[in-house]
Image (tube, helix red, strand yellow):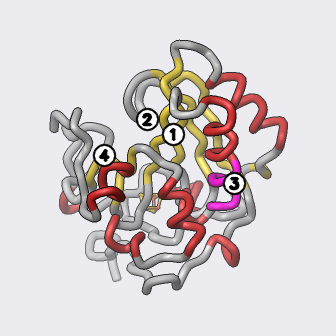
Amino acid sequence: MSQATRKPNNPMPKEWTAKELSQGFIADYKAFNFVDGEGVRCSLYVSGCKFMCPGCYNVVAQNFHYGHPYSQELEDQIIEDLSQDYVQGLTLLGGEPFLNTQVCIQLAKRIRQEFGHTKDIWSWTGYTWDELQQETDDKLELLSLIDILVDGRFLEDQKDLTLQFRGSANQRIIDVPKSLASGDVVIWDKLVR
Ligand code: SF4
């Protein structure tokens, strides 16, 4: 099948698990950036994704062995960076954070311990909100620790570079606490486009 007609992979519920796939590797860490969500943010790019979206913005990070292992030193650095007053929060992206839940849950819990809810946590995922509701317990645990989720595969035929924080029109910026409380998807109330 050609690149033009290929679609992202569509897993069955619970087909892909972090337990089987994650190597605990990190593709990149970027402190103090302005592009991965609202405000000044620190971004952790985890390694490994099986959606294989054509046109993926970070193809190298689809490999679960790309980069280097997550470490205590990196975690301590992230916490120190987040402690700056002007930093709004952490962003998880990749790769697929929900296939690297061991690392992401550990870090998200540490952030709640250190900062409570004074720092927010955003995450990107190739899973849709509805798919995540049928997923493994670790994915649901990570979801419960996140404030804002940008959901869904990148679809080239819906590509739109004018959208806030997302590449294709199917993706949504979701307020996670409000959505979990109401049982339905609640879109981020600061969405402009
Ligand atoms: S879900 Fe994201 S990281 Fe994974 S292949 Fe698609 S665009 Fe790339």
Q: Amino acid at mark 3?
A: Val
Point out the residue furthest to the top here.
Answer: 85
- The answer to whether marks 1 and 3 mark residues whose Cβ atoms lie closer than 8 Å is no
Q: Quadrant of the N terminus?
A: bottom left
* 192 sits left or right of 96 in the view: left
Report x, y in % for residue 121. 50, 40
- Which residue was labeled with disc 3? 103
Q: Residue at x 72, y 23 (%)?
A: 80
**Under 8 Å from ligand 1: the CB of mark 3?**
no
Q: CA distance from mark 2 to mark 3?
A: 19 Å
Q: Tell me which label, 2 or 3, sits earlier in the chain.
A: 2
Image quarter where ligand 1 lies: bottom left
Label 4: state its secondary structure. Answer: loop
Q: Which residues are magenta?
A: 101-106
- Amino acid type, callout 4: Arg
Question: Which quarter of the picture shows residue 154?
Answer: bottom left
Q: What residue sits right under mark 1 in the picture?
A: 91
Q: Distance from label 1 to label 3 (Cα)?
A: 13 Å
Q: Which residue is tagged 2?
A: 36
User: Marks 3 and 4, how far apart in space?
Assistant: 24 Å
Q: CA distance from mark 2 to mark 4?
A: 9 Å
Judged by depth in the image, the label closer to the viewer, 1 or 4, is 1
* Amino acid type at image mark 2: Asp
Kind of residue indicated by mark 1: Thr
Judge depth for marks 3 and 4 and give the one in front: 3
Image coords of residue 16 (percent x, y): 55, 79
Badge 2: few (under 14), some or many (20 or more) residues near its Cα, within 10 Å?
Answer: many
First in sequence: mark 2 vs mark 4? 2
Which mark is on residue 166? 4
SS label for mark 1: strand
